[in-house]
Amino acid sequence: MCEGRKKVEETNGKVDLIIPVYRPDEKLERLIKRINAQTVRPGHVFFMQTLTGTKEDARVRELLERTENAVVSTLDKSGFDHGGTRNRGAAMSRAEYMLFMTQDAVPADDFLVEKLLQALEADKQTAIAYARQLPDETVGFIEHYTRRFNYPPESSSKTKEDLPRLGIKTYFCSNVCAMYRREVYRQMGGFVLHTIFNEDMIMAAGVIQAGYRIAYAAEAKVVHAHRYTYRQQFKRNFDLAVSQKQYHEIFDGIRSESEGIRLVKTTMKYLLAKGKWYLVPDLVLQSGFKFLGYRFGKKYDRLPMKVVRKFSMNPSYWK
């Protein structure tokens, strides 16, 4: 924080925060500390806690209630849905703006809410503003570059006119940390129900097609990254492709795979330029597993259900 900067004590109810919670790790405690220290603090923080049926539930609830203005709502694991659970949280909000986050996204500073709010209030046609995701020390050199590729340091704005240039990246938005204008969220009917993945991009596509803007607010930053194994990368891309197949009316005809190829090419050039040639085999393997997962996911409806469950990162979805 800049010296002498005065913190805002109240948010006057403009922003509510919604976070699904299930078996959190130590990142959740750091997230809560950062939320309590924000220059603009949410009027309410709605935690959607999926119960495990163990003693851990009480400990997690006690942690959640340390958050200023916390409201904890519980649900059984069978009742969790990527879109539906977030919709339940949104239904409790009366705020003008709703910020959705995941339990492992830790604000990088005290200005996260403030910067996202600024991005939305700067232009009434902007319906969503999403944050920059920074890697942490647990991920490798390749993931650091990938994060910069997907979340550059420069802010930007996307509209329907950008589809020929950006392809599927026009619809890119992440509920890891994204703030929505509640009026537009309601106009879109909320998030889709019973989707395996990608409820944020499906919503973003509807917003873009309706003529609104999506802002990428690079000054709003969260620390969020995963060190996926090759198998996990396969499974994640399998589920990504399944969601695109299920909502083919949104994603058909939109340039998609070429963006992945561009990422691989630029990453390889970067590795060679930095003298990290020994990481090229790792890049090739990562990319290969991602590609195979994506291709199998596009044909999931032709595979035996036993295989689909094995390939998916969310096998419970298929029950």
Image (cartoon, rainbow, N blue to C red):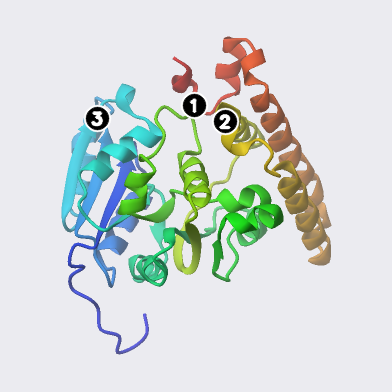
| The label number, if any, that marks residue 31 in the structure image | none
Q: Position of residue 208 (x, y in %)?
A: 52, 51
Image side of residue 16 versus residue 307, left or right = left
The furthest residue to the bottom: 4
At mark 3, the secondary structure is: strand
Q: Nearer the viewer, residue 175 or 254?
A: 254
Q: Position of residue 219 (x, y in %)?
A: 47, 71
Distance between mark 1 and mark 2 Cα atoms: 8 Å
Q: From this view, report whether residue 172 is shown above or below residue 8.
A: above
| The label number, if any, that marks residue 75 in the structure image | 3
Residue 235 visible in the picture? no
Residue bearing mark 2: 239
Decide: marks 1, 2 in contact (CB < 8 A)?
Answer: yes
Q: Amino acid at mark 2?
A: Asp
Label count reads 3
Quarter of the image that includes the C terminus: top left
Residue 145 visible in the picture? yes
Q: What residue is at 65 percent from the left and 35 percent from the top?
A: 252
- Mark closest to the chain's N terminus, 1 or 3: 3
Q: Amino acid at mark 3?
A: Leu
Decide: marks 1, 3 in contact (CB < 8 A)?
Answer: no
* Classed neighbour count for the residue bearing mark 3: other residues with Cα under 10 Å, few (<14), some (14–19), many (≥20): few
Q: Nearer the viewer, residue 226 or 188?
A: 188
- Mark closest to the chain's N terminus, 1 or 2: 2
At mark 1, the secondary structure is: loop
Image quadrant assignment for residue 97:
bottom left
Distance between mark 1 and mark 3 Cα atoms: 18 Å
Image side of residue 11 versus residue 18, left or right = left
